[in-house]
Amino acid sequence: MRARDLDLRELLEFPPKGGVIRFAGDRAVLLNTVALGLLRRELVETLGAVTARGILTRFGYAHGWRTAESLKTAFNWETEHEWQLAGGRLHQLQGFLLYEPVERVTGEPPRHLFESVWRDSYEAQEHLMQIGPSSEPVCWTLCGFASGYLSCCQGRRIYCVEERCRARGDAFCLMAGRAEDDWGEDVKAQLAFFGQACLDDSLRHVTDLLKMTERRLTLRRRELARVQVEESKTGIVAQSEPMQRALDEVHRVARVDSTVLLTGESGVGKEALARLVHDESARATRPFVAVNCAAVPDALIESELFGHARGAFTGATQDRVGLFEAANQGTLLLDEVGDLPPAMQVKLLRVLQEREFRRVGENRTRHVDVRVLAATHRDLTAEVAAGRFRQDLYYRLRVIEIRIPPLRERRDDILPLARRFLTETAARLHLPVTAFAPRSADLLLQWTWPGNVRELQNVVERAIVLARGTRVEVDDLPEELRRPPAEDAPGTPLRLAEVERAHILGVLESVGGNRTKAAAVLGIGPATLFRKLTEYGRAGTDASR
């Protein structure tokens, strides 16, 4: 778990019609910042600035300490450092400020143990509004929070002070944090506002009492989104480095008219990237036509691609335009091109080379201006070696090859994709589900996704349909996601073929052996599914289904 993986929609629980609100599992209330500013003014006017500062600083310290303890047990942090970073991220999500860690210069010793820029501090704003400009920093509660949070994380007293503050005319607030003994004498006076030396022990006692009376955190994660989901205008999620590289290649090849081969496992989104190539090319205003070669019977594939003349064969009652003609001046995607029969491979090669073809049953040669994109989940190099795919066609298609990484190699994209699918599917189905419970999100991250993005989309839709409330809980996910991952024997990792076999047979079983439905869920043609089942010795499955 990383601090940036926290998400306000998953941290905040509330009944739509009102009632108890919980944030990160603790009961929370919404307070108007003007009211907080008025309280500050009353404290200052009634008790004096020194006492008011002490009260607000100690309140912030208690809040920070409590928050740190809650977050430590509520989430499985990747490192202690991520737990430490989560304090600032969480404060930002709660609306107190915009938090920016100060980047340290390589090779230079840090000025402070902790340092961050605070922008749009609510506390500085309200002090200016209710009391006016100050000669001293005024973000007392925020400094207290940072001190309490970091002290809990570090296991020693950390005190944070403001070196700059908007309330005294600076452009932004600047927080600096050090261990108690590392502060100089010029700052020691400010540390008195944090109270007596026994403050930590008192706070531990208070938090222990709170734990006995409050509901344990039910929220176990997710994302204080300092970095929002990075989606291109096409809707393609590419937050992970492998997917960003693939997307960069797509942007570059879109500018030229070369043939592109998109490779990757079933369900990784090859067609989506093919559409992006088309949309960013000079042919964007022309047709984009896609055909799944594995889904078309061998006897009909030539007619599907090139069209046919009336009377060319039984049932050809009229002339028919093929997909090459339909895509003229545009882009044609040949999906699962590795499943083309050998005879069709020869004819496709000629079209790619000569840019001309004949309809079935016709002698007239037709010319076509089409950019061809091809996609396949097969290893065409192995198919060529096995004699199942023509080498010359392979090289003709592979002018530029772009590999689309499987979902297990782009883990940073799993939650952004899942959340997008959740939002879109819930709206389409008119269901009130708005987020994943933290443990559910954690299980999504742990799963290997042999079916890739398509499997994730199906899992999310299933979970939304089964969800009883506004969040997807663990019980709403498929059983295989809820099981702990199997312990593989050292040195015997699963091969890709074994993962594919298990996934295909699992999908087939989940639809009651119905091959048509299984092929649709897997995103492959019935002929391809039959060939796979034959390889697995399962071709005897009821073919009538």
Image (spheres, rainbow, N blue to C red):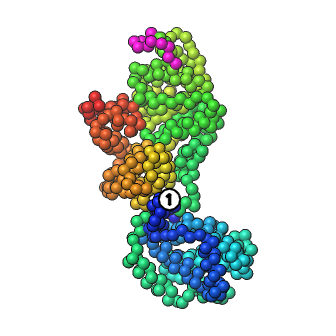
Question: Dot 1: within a 10 Å radius of its alpha carbon, few (fewer than 14), some, or many (20 or more) residues?
Answer: some
Residue located 52% across and 35% down the image: 261
Q: Nearer the viewer, residue 371 or 474?
A: 474
Q: Secondary structure at mark 1?
A: helix
Q: Is residue 320 left or right of residue 444?
A: right
- Percent across and percent down for residue 367 are 59, 18
Residue 174: within the magenta? no
Q: Tell me if residue 252 can be seen.
A: yes
Residue 313: within the magenta? yes
Q: Residue furthest front?
A: 17
Q: Is residue 484 left or right of residue 240?
A: left
Is residue 403 placed above or below 481 in the rendered structure? above
Is residue 352 placed above or below 155 in the rendered structure? above
Q: Is residue 435 left or right of residue 539?
A: right
Residue located 33% across and 31% down the image: 530
Q: Quadrant of the C terminus?
A: top left
Please state the extent of the stretch shown in magenta in the rendering: 311-321
User: Callout 1, which amino acid?
Assistant: Arg
- Percent across and percent down for residue 303 are 46, 19
Q: Which residue is mark 1?
A: 9
